[in-house]
Image (cartoon, rainbow, N blue to C red):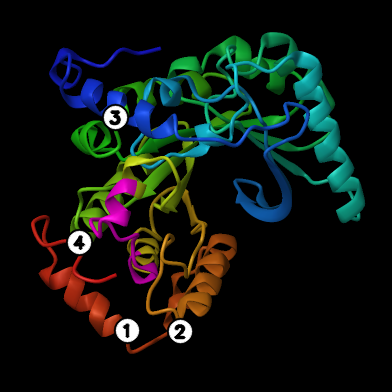
């Protein structure tokens, strides 16, 4: 794993201080989880370089993200859903896969073309998913067309990718880059790696036939005003689209999860999730980049997820989903609401010292 530079990891300051606080917050978790059951599984449709595909999304229940256990990212509470003890056996992981296949058989007319596997950490980190399990999962889904695997850039190497491409799978690695701006990633997200590390992972994938990168970006991390977040997101999408090997960018509006710094800020009225109008605006502004750009606002319309005035949230969310599949920015011309004027005022007036202006 990459190590933070001295500038952002001085003892008792910066990342070190944040991680100490986050370990205390995460220690409040009381729930425990069955290592034989996945965290979540669902069926959907996704846009891929080969067109729209039916998808089976699997959130494996592992021992949790290594970085999150050290303290982790300001917005990510997924480690609270991981199995206690830090590891899950091969047999238990394969039991989880069987549960997901049973779910698919019961709810789909035919097997999904696309498999998406997340661990809320790094699937390619062998502390989370061992080599035996990785290869067994590759063989299990070798009859599908494409697979997406979540990982930090540290763990992306040719051998792990070819475990899947050798099975005939188009293989995409989903990297939680969050932003192309190193200072925002370090100071607002508390992530240790640099944009250059993401570029290196893209180069590794580009060198493997049938492998590629899907960048995950975070819309409005804490400590950024709405206009700052929008500007950073547009720039980040454009920079990612210019990196060879990165064919898809997924913009994830920040939502407020338990046991996180964002949750602490939100409770004290110091953080508001992004406006859905901001999400739509970014998608419109980046529609012509050389990459697929998608967004799936989690918890849209709630106080803890991306939202507008509540009256138009479902309509804007529907337009965003439509854009994901069609990549046509004209879909946003079909939605309007009086609250758009409030959003425009926020974009004009909100600054770091007075945000959030609205709830």
Tell me: 223 left or right of 100: left
Give the foreground label among 3 and 1. 3
Q: Quadrant of the C terminus?
A: bottom left
Task: Identify which residue, 350 or 44, lies in the foreground.
Answer: 350
Quarter of the figure with residue 276: bottom left
Instruction: Determine whether the residue tagged by mark 2 lies in a helix, strand or loop.
Output: loop
Q: Which residue is mark 3?
A: 21
- Give the CA separation, mark 2 to mark 3: 37 Å
Q: Which residue is mark 2?
A: 311
Task: Identify which residue, 10 or 84, lies in the foreground.
Answer: 84
Above or below, 161 against 300 in this view is above
Q: Provide residue 36's location: percent of width, then percent of height.
A: 78, 28
User: Magenta residues?
Assistant: 264-278
Q: Which residue is mark 4?
A: 227
Instruction: Determine whether the residue tagged by mark 4 lies in a helix, strand or loop.
Output: helix
Q: Which residue is mark 1?
A: 339
Say whether disc 2 or disc 3 marks the residue closer to the N-terminus.
3
Q: Does the magenta portion include 273? A: yes
Q: Is residue 81 visible?
A: yes
Marks 2 & 3, CB-CB < 8 Å contact: no
- Give the CA separation, mark 3 to mark 1: 37 Å
Say whether disc 1 or disc 4 marks the residue closer to the N-terminus.
4
Q: Quadrant of the N terminus?
A: top left
- Give the CA separation, mark 1 to mark 2: 9 Å
Q: Residue at x 22, y 77 (%)?
A: 344
Q: Which mark is residue 69?
A: none
Quarter of the figure with residue 283: bottom left
């Amino acid at each position: 794993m990459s190590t933070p530079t001295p500038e952002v990891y001085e003892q008792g300051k910066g990342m070190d201080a944040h991680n100490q606080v986050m370990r205390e917050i995460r220690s409040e978790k009381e729930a425990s989880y069955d290592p034989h059951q996945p965290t979540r599984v669902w069926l959907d449709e996704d846009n891929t370089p080969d067109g729209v595909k039916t998808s089976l999304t699997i959130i494996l229940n592992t021992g949790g993200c290594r970085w999150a256990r050290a303290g982790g990212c300001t917005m990510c509470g997924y480690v609270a859903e991981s199995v206690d003890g830090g590891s899950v056996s091969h047999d238990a992981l394969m039991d989880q896969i069987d549960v997901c296949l049973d779910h698919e058989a019961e709810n789909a007319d035919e097997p999904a073309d696309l498999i998406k596997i997340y661990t809320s950490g790094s699937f390619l980190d062998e502390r989370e998913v061992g080599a035996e399990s990785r290869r067994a999962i590759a063989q299990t889904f070798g009859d599908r067309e494409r697979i997406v695997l979540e990982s930090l850039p540290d763990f992306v190497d040719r051998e792990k990718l070819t475990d899947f491409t050798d099975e005939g799978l188009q293989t995409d690695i989903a990297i939680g880059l969050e932003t192309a701006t190193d200072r925002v990633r370090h100071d607002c997200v508390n992530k240790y790696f640099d944009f250059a590390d993401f570029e290196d992972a893209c180069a590794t994938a580009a060198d493997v036939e049938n492998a590629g990168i899907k960048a995950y970006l975070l819309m409005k991390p804490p400590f950024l005003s709405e206009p700052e977040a929008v500007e950073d997101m547009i720039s980040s999408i454009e920079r990612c689209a210019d990196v060879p090997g990165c064919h898809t960018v997924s913009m994830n509006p920040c939502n407020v999860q338990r046991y996180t710094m964002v949750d602490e800020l939100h409770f004290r009225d110091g953080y508001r999730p992004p406006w859905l109008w901001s999400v739509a605006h970014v998608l419109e502004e980046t529609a012509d980049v050389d990459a697929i750009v998608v967004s799936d606002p989690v918890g849209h319309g709630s106080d803890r997820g991306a939202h507008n005035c509540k009256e138009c949230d479902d309509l804007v969310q529907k337009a965003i989903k439509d854009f994901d599949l069609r990549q046509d920015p004209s879909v946003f011309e079909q939605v309007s609401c009086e609250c758009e004027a409030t959003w425009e005022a926020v974009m004009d007036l909100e600054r770091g010292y007075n945000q959030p202006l609205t709830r």
